[in-house]
Image: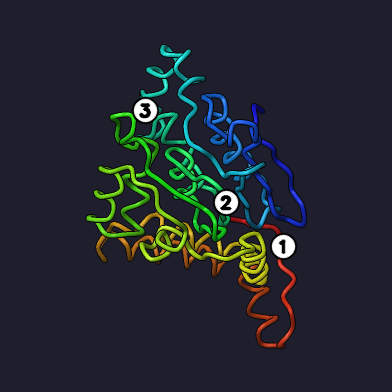
């Protein structure tokens, strides 16, 4: 893959943007590889969580216009939605993580700008270092964010904040991001925060975790009439599965459950 590293350790997939000399500025190849990596994780039923981070001094400074600008034909082709979904290649780099059936945690540090921020917002959780600075920087280039932010930010903050940050392109710090709901936590050790959350999640059935994610991804914008059937179908699948039985047996015996690989 192009400047995207991938390693599974202790059932956790570590995905890293690996272009540190450019503050992990995103190339078109990196965007394609991020979506491909999300698909790779989805197919590995042994993986329990994903940590998405950046090498070097920053998470990502956003799209590398100098690099991408040399491929105008490819840019126009990437703007065309895929037949299988409404997302195009730019949007899929961020939104593909919502389809991964395990929690995805972005760990942020340094700069988190433009496309980098949109990829981070595609994760389920975001833990930021206290020194992180963030920006929806597309306004600087006379553009709007077009890598799935319109869907992700709507779940996290108010419409006036979304409009303000998109219209101004202003830079804000991690604590302000926390106040606006754009990150899940801020500390001097965001990787440690991610590890604590992952350890808690790994104590639960991988199928229940996958179903929890699917439940909200498929109902968040819906009313009860559309949401309740999704909730019902997922619960029935869990009740028929091995991991739910393992959880019940261990709970009654007050023992630690030993789950099998994810079935959902």
Residue 237 shown left or right of residue 230 in the figure:
right
Label 2 packing within 10 angstroms: few (<14), some (14-19), many (20+): many
Check residue 206 in the rendering and tell me which mark sits there, or answer none: none
Q: Are marks 3 and 1 in contact (CB under 8 Å)?
A: no
User: Which residue lies under the disc numbered 3?
Assistant: 81
Residue 118 shown left or right of residue 161 in the figure:
right
- Above/below status of 186 relative to 102: below
User: Which residue lies under the disc numbered 1?
Assistant: 260
Label 1 packing within 10 angstroms: few (<14), some (14-19), many (20+): some
Indicate which disc, 1 or 2, sits on the residue closer to the N terminus: 2
Name the residue located 30 percent from the left edge and 48 percent from the top edge: 165
Q: Secondary structure at mark 3?
A: loop
Indicate which disc, 3 or 2, sits on the residue closer to the N terminus: 3
Check residue 109 in the rendering and tell me which mark sits there, or answer none: 2
Residue 167 position, x and y percent, is 25, 42
Please identify the quadrant where the C terminus is shown: bottom right
**Which residue occupies the foreground of this view, 143 or 16?**
143
Q: What is the C-alpha distance between the residues marked 3 and 1?
A: 37 Å
């Amino acid at each position: 893959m192009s400047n995207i590293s991938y390693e599974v350790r202790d059932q956790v997939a570590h995905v890293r943007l690996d272009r540190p000399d450019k503050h992990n500025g995103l190339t078109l190849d990196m965007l394609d590889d991020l979506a491909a990596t999300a698909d790779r994780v989805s197919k590995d039923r042994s993986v329990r969580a994903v940590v998405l981070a950046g090498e070097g001094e920053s998470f990502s400074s956003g799209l590398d216009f100098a690099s991408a600008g040399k491929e105008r034909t490819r840019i126009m082709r990437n703007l065309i939605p895929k037949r299988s979904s409404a997302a195009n290649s730019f949007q899929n780099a961020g939104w593909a993580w919502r389809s991964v059936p395990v929690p995805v945690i972005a760990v942020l540090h340094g700069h988190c700008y433009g496309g980098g921020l949109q990829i981070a917002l595609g994760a389920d959780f975001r833990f930021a270092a206290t020194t992180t600075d963030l920006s929806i920087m597309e306004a600087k280039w006379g553009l709007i964010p077009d890598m799935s932010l319109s869907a992700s930010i709507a779940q996290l903050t108010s419409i006036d904040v979304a409009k303000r940050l998109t219209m101004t392109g202003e830079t804000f710090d991690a604590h302000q991001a926390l106040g606006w709901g754009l990150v899940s936590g801020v500390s001097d050790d965001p990787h440690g925060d991610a590890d604590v959350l992952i350890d808690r999640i790994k104590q639960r059935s991988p199928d229940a975790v996958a179903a929890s994610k699917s439940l909200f991804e498929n109902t968040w914008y819906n009313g009860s009439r559309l949401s309740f059937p999704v909730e019902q179908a997922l619960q029935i699948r869990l009740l028929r599965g091995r991991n739910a039985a393992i959880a019940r047996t261990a709970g009654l015996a007050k023992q630690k459950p030993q789950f099998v690989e994810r079935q959902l």
